Image (spheres, rainbow, N blue to C red):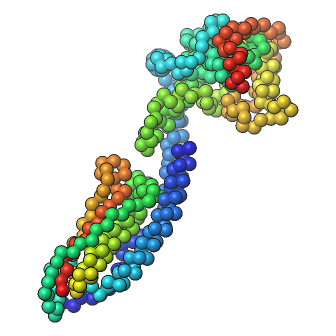
Amino acid sequence: MDLIIFMILVGVGFATGTIIERKHFQSIRLRERRHLNLVTTSTKITDPEKNISDAILVSGSVVVSVDYFKRVLAALINITGGRVAPYETLLDRGRREAILRMKESAHAWGAHSIVNMRVQTSTIGNQNGKNSLGMVEVIAYGTAVK
Amino acid sequence: MKNTIKEVDESVNLPKVSLLGQFFTLMIGLLVVIGAVYFALGWAVNVVVDHLSHETYAKLQQRVSQHEFLPVAKKMQQLQDLLDELVALSPNPDLKLKFRVLCEPQFNAVALPDGSVVFFEKLLRSIHSENELAMVMGHEIGHYISRDHMKVMGRGILLVLFSMLFQMEDVDWVGPSTSMYHAKYSQHQETLADEMGANLVHKKYGHISGIESFFRTMETIDMDEHGHKHPGKFVSWFSTHPHPQDRWKHLKQQWKKTEGEGKETFLDLSEIDLLCPPKASSQAH
């Protein structure tokens, strides 16, 4: 019985996780293209050709979780070692989504660029337990100038 | 400084492997490794149990005996005496075994690690003579002498160790051992136990009459009212035991020269009605 429940959870996790992830990536690509011209750098130097009249702190944060299938796969990779591919997509989605939210915030304010951008991550939930890497928070922040 | 506008390069961070393919590869690999380790350890348990000295084995048996595996099973002094008599005739007369009855509608008998030879009610009610009973008792004594019950328990403990390794909770080590009436011995172990049973019957009565009728009873219980076989319905004895006809054929070949037809001894099993009231048992059916 436990095995059947496990298989159902893995199957449902795989199906829903794949659909949600595919849709999220589509949305990310579309919005990234839309904000491509908003210059975003990790340096403190601004474009000397552009005058700066104002600056504010902008940030974007996101909390994403893996599905059950990816969690099981990551646990299996934990035994053998190697590249943990299921978490790589999770973190990539998280980073890009957080940067996009930050950009959208800056764009709404009317910024022409963001400087000194930083990205940080932290796990959410029981960090000592076996499900410690289930959810991750990614925050991106920088100085928007116009 | 020039700032080049460029789309995110997904080939850098995103994995190119198929996650589903990776999942199945790892799952199959893990199952193969677990299977290999399980069989290797199971084999190791067999070797270790076979090579334990009598003293060490007695200590182990004593320790295991402290746990009562089937507390609901009932004593039956009349048949305890018969069991003691057969043990005295066996190659290990120092064996301490307890005869117990379990009021359950199963045609089965088991040898538990605590030294209990447990007969299920249905089997006991199907017995026609003392000789038939002695055959089953001798069969179980054969399992004790080959230390089969301890080997099966060893595998049970290994199973629990595996489940602990993979953090499956709520598993206790006694659990698998208490359900030892589902224990599976190999056909080779069963054949050796049969030989021991027939040997003890011959030693006690001077012939092996009664054994054939017992195997016939086993066959009829495996059939429905139309004489058709119930595949899978009757699993307790037949799942790992060779077919009753083959078992009898094998024993007949073994005892061809020495066997003589003899009279079967009558067995009064009326005491069983006191232990397992017929009304309750018919309801259970």
Residue displayed at 14% across by 84% down:
A54
Residue drawn 27% across and 71% down?
Answer: A60
Using the image, determine if residue B260 lies above or below residue A45.
above
Q: Quadrant of residue A135?
A: bottom left
Question: In the displayed image of the protein, which residue is found farthest to the right?
Answer: B226
Residue A15 visible to the viewer: yes
Judge whether B203 appears above or below B27 on screen.
Answer: above
* A137 left or right, relative to A9: left
* Quadrant position of the N terminus of chain B in the picture: bottom left
Q: Residue at x 50, y 56 (%)?
A: A10
- B76 or B65: nearer the eye? B76
- Between residues A84 and A39, which one lies in front from this camera angle? A39
Residue B264 at x, y percent in the picture: 80, 9
In the image, taking residue B80 as reference, residue B13 lies left or right, namely: left
Residue A116 visible in the picture: no
Between A64 and B116, which is closer to the camera in this rendering? A64
Q: Position of residue A88 (x, y in %)?
A: 37, 66
Residue at position x 68%, y 14% from top?
Answer: B277
Q: Horizontal and vertical percent for residue B6?
A: 32, 85
Q: How many marks?
A: 0
Residue A78: image location, x then y, percent: 39, 54
Residue sticking out furthest to the bottom:
A49
Q: Quadrant of the C terminus of chain B?
A: top right
Q: Nearer the viewer, residue A96 or B174?
A: A96
